[in-house]
Amino acid sequence: MPKPRKSSLETATARRKLAVRKGSYFVKISPGISLGYRRNQGAGVWSVRATDGHGGEWLKKIGIADDLEPAAPPLVLDYWHALEAARKLARKQAGAPEDEGKPLTVAQVLGFYEDDLRARNQNPQNAVWVRSHLTTMLLSKPVALLSSRELQRWRDSLLEKISASSINRLCGSFVAALNLAASHDHRLKNVWRVGLQSLPDADEDRNVVLADDQVRTFVAACYQHDTALGSFADTMAETGSRPSQIARLTVADLVTDPKRPKLMMPRSGKGGGRNRASRKSLRVPVPIGVQLASKLGSAAKARASEAALLLQSDGSSWGSEPSRNYRNAVSEIVKEIGLGPDTTLYALRHSSIVRQLLAQVPIRIIAGTHDTSVAMIERFYSRFIADHSDEHTRRALLQPESPSAESKVVQIQVSR
């Protein structure tokens, strides 16, 4: 293999004649690959610069130059050692150890994270969402070269586009992807702990809660628009379950008891960590009304027990992300019936939780049937909990003394 010559870099004597500066002196050693030498007051530093094939490039330090001590690879390198190390690092040629391969870019890390989410039966859109908000420069940059200030600037720039709470969720997914990369490469420094830390006071309660009359109007409008969408909305209004759970219901999950019908609702994967798949296989009994049970039973009468209970009007599944199939229709319905622009089908879940709170159903039971936790209900529905607790608290208030109380006082004489 030809070895590019550069007399000013080949020996320590020649390099000492170079001016000390922040920028490196480069020599092209292969197409898209350059070897760099940074002249310092002490020993210089070798680095490799290479293109990433997407219009960007990356730069990585590969070792110390033999300016003050003899070459001792892989830490102290002469020109020829640095040349070979630069090529191997950029091209991952045979002989390059796995952990000395080409540094992973942010785009590659997000790709690995997306694959990992799929393997663990989680939503790969978490990775896609992060990718859609990153600049081309950040996507092409090696993770090892990210700085906390750079990540913080990117995070703060999002305030012009999305809410602070959305930014925190987005950064949470980005951090998960970077943590996954760091778990496979101990050399990566966790600069994202500072650069992507959550914005303060971002957990604003934006849950849309509808009155019972509004819920009934909403569901009726869904039925009028499309029977399949109406059944989906009706089920969500009565159970308060998430759309993803409702989409996974099977015919066998419908229990058509004449007096106490219910749905054996699949649990979501939330909070399941790496046991997500086993958690989603569990079922929780959720009561429903006789009328809804009759509608669901009639619609599913000819289907096998393992078939989906709720289908779209064309007979297809609602899928793992049902909102993609009903979002536009629901937006039109919301406008037609005069609900607020922030109203989505998820408002039916919020309304169900609040309805049960105001009906004085114990919070632990509400948490169980809605597949959430008491802590989450207290966190996001606290103002309704205050209404819920008002009647109980009022019973324990100190009552004023009655007018006749004084006449009933009996003085006790104590003899000495």
Image (spheres, rainbow, N blue to C red):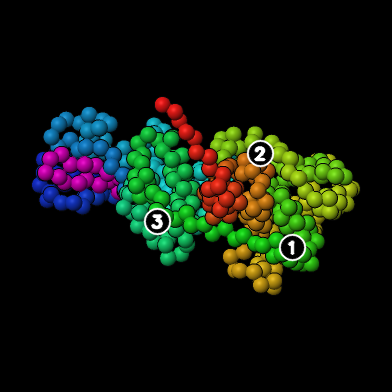
Q: In the rendered structure, which disc, 2 or 1, sits on the residue that comes first in sequence?
A: 1
- What amino acid is found at the position of numbered circle 2 in the picture? Lys
Please tell me whether mark 1 sits on a helix, a strand or a loop.
Answer: helix
Label 1 Cα crowd, 10 Å radius (few <14 / some 14-19 / many 20+): some
Location of residue 227 in the rendering, given as x and y in whole percent from the top left corner: 80, 61
Distance between the alpha carbons at the discs numbered 2 and 1:
30 Å
User: Magenta part of the protein: which range?
Assistant: 34-57
> Is residue 47 or residue 263 the one in the foreground?
263
- What amino acid is found at the position of numbered circle 3 in the picture? Arg
- What amino acid is found at the position of numbered circle 1 in the picture? Arg
Q: Is residue 251 visible?
A: no
Q: Please give the residue where the numbered disc 3 appears in the rendered image.
A: 155
**Residue 44 lies in the magenta-colored region:** yes
Label 2 Cα crowd, 10 Å radius (few <14 / some 14-19 / many 20+): some
Residue 270 lies in quadrant: top right
**Residue 46 lies in the magenta-colored region:** yes
Location of residue 305 in the rendering, given as x and y in whole percent from the top left corner: 83, 41
Please tell me whether mark 2 sits on a helix, a strand or a loop.
Answer: helix
